[in-house]
Image (cartoon, rainbow, N blue to C red):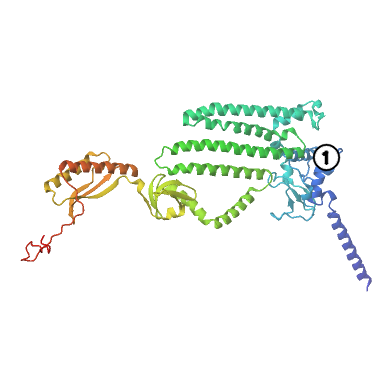
Amino acid sequence: MSEQVRMTLRLALTALLAFGAAAHAQAPPVAEDLRSPRTTLDTFLGGQLQDEISWDSVTATLDFDPGVAADERQLTATQLKSVLDGRGLFVRMDVVPADPEYVDPDTREAAFTPFPIRLPEFQVRRGADQAWRIAARTVRAAEGLYEDTFSWYARSLLDLLPPVVERSFLGFTLWQLIGLAILAGIAWGAQWLLKIFFQGFLVRFARDRAGWAAEDLSAAALPASWLASVWVFRRFLADLRFPVLVNQVLTVLLDLTLAAIAVWFAYRAIDALCTKLEAITAKTETKVDDHLVPLARTALRVGSVIVAFLLIAQSQGYSITTLVAGLGLGGLAIALAAQDTLANVMGSLAIVADRPFQVGDWVLVDGYEGTVERVGLRSTRVRTFYDSVVSVPNSKVVNSIVDNMGQRKFRRMKHMLALRYDTDPDRIQAFVDGVRGLILKNPAMRHDYFEIHLNRFADSSVDVLVYCFFRVPNWHEELSERHNFLLSILRLAKEIGVDFAFPTRTLALEHPPGDGDSFPADPAGR
């Protein structure tokens, strides 16, 4: 091998070694404190709990823009830590990924969000240098999050407090205990004012303007006042700057209390609303809508409990979208398993909307005849004329032919009056005219249409057709008016001298010529 070739190989080897060293210098190893989401958050949070805080290590966990001063970096780190503490967001390190190559399963990004529902702005991301830091967008949003968490007047007042209030008492500073007492006073004042507003102005206004019952609205005053009181504690809890574990426990308790009181208030408000609806439906002609009010009351109460449950779940970091999707799949499975029940429920809504009958009507439906007693969510109850109760599924009611005899304006009467064949024709005419006069004089009968005529010659009578209508609201009134009308016909017949026929038959016997009327002699000579 020539000397020139050897020199070339030496130069190439030197270049490769130099390139490798340069590449190694451009990609330094990742610091141990930033190698995974867990180590980064542990350094950021744990470092600020030390007596001697190493602000260089703490601020190194944040992805600052170039040129940010050291004091501003320290302020941002303090604000983010205060936001987590004030909102009761305790980071459990055992659930934070320790894998340097972690990828979010939803977004497929090298990022981790400890509180995706309650604080989605707080995120840890892996940078181009493979180090995990609190994301730049979180750093830029730190001041806004801090202002949203703590009220401005509490922040201003905290800066004006003398050093003496920083003394510790029972594990809390003196100013925290004073602030808790002030917050209790504000809560009591809000409760008192809201109770006065409900029981005074609102009750009088609603009673005078809309006709609401005072006792119904007054019943909602107590839960409304407690709702305001607990909300004050929940809203300004962060301003007391309690430790994160204390805030976490108090936040859960206050959220559960708020939800319970909100459901209590919703129940009272729903009762007041349904009482008003009952008064409105009582004035309508139909009685079917009277049964809608209890159904609406139950549906609204169940809905208020579901909404409260979803809000509690969201406040504790669960996704409402996921819960609703789960409820949707569960609802689909229940719907497939209970098609008949759902058909009956839809049938009840169709009955209310179409109003083929109302409670108390005499109906013939699906082969059953009787009086409608109740229209329920699943079935319609009909009391038959032999006093049994038949429950007809609403799906059958909707798909059946319903003969509603209770909605008749007129009740028909068709009858044949049988007169004797030996009745004088003039008396028959007088009798017919008299029956017509009885109808015209009776206010409970239809006067514009009726038929009273000599109709036919029957086997044993001359029949007069009586075809007329009663203007009565129910079967009882129909029977009563029919009774009075028939009695008046009997009196008219007696007055005119017309007799009613009954089935008779005349037998004529004929004898052969020569027989005469003789009878055989008595053998005994008698």
Q: Which sits in the foreground, 137 or 476?
A: 476
**Quarter of the image where the C terminus is located:** bottom left
Q: Which sits in the foreground, 336 or 205?
A: 336
* Residue at point 32%, 41% (across, down): 477
Considering every residue shown, the one lying at the far front of the view is: 524
Give SS at disc 1.
loop
Q: Which sits in the foreground, 279 or 5?
A: 279
* Residue at point 60%, 33% (across, down): 223
Position of 210 with respect to 232 (left or right) is: left
**Residue 464 x/y as whole percent:** 19, 50
**Number of numbered labels in the structure image:** 1
Considering every residue shown, the one lying at the far left of the view is: 514
Amino acid at dot 1: Leu
**Residue 430 x/y as whole percent:** 14, 44
Q: Which sits in the foreground, 306 or 27?
A: 306
* Residue at point 23%, 41% (across, down): 488
**Quarter of the image where the N terminus is located:** bottom right
Position of 435 with respect to 107 (left or right) is: left
Q: Which residue is mark 1?
A: 49
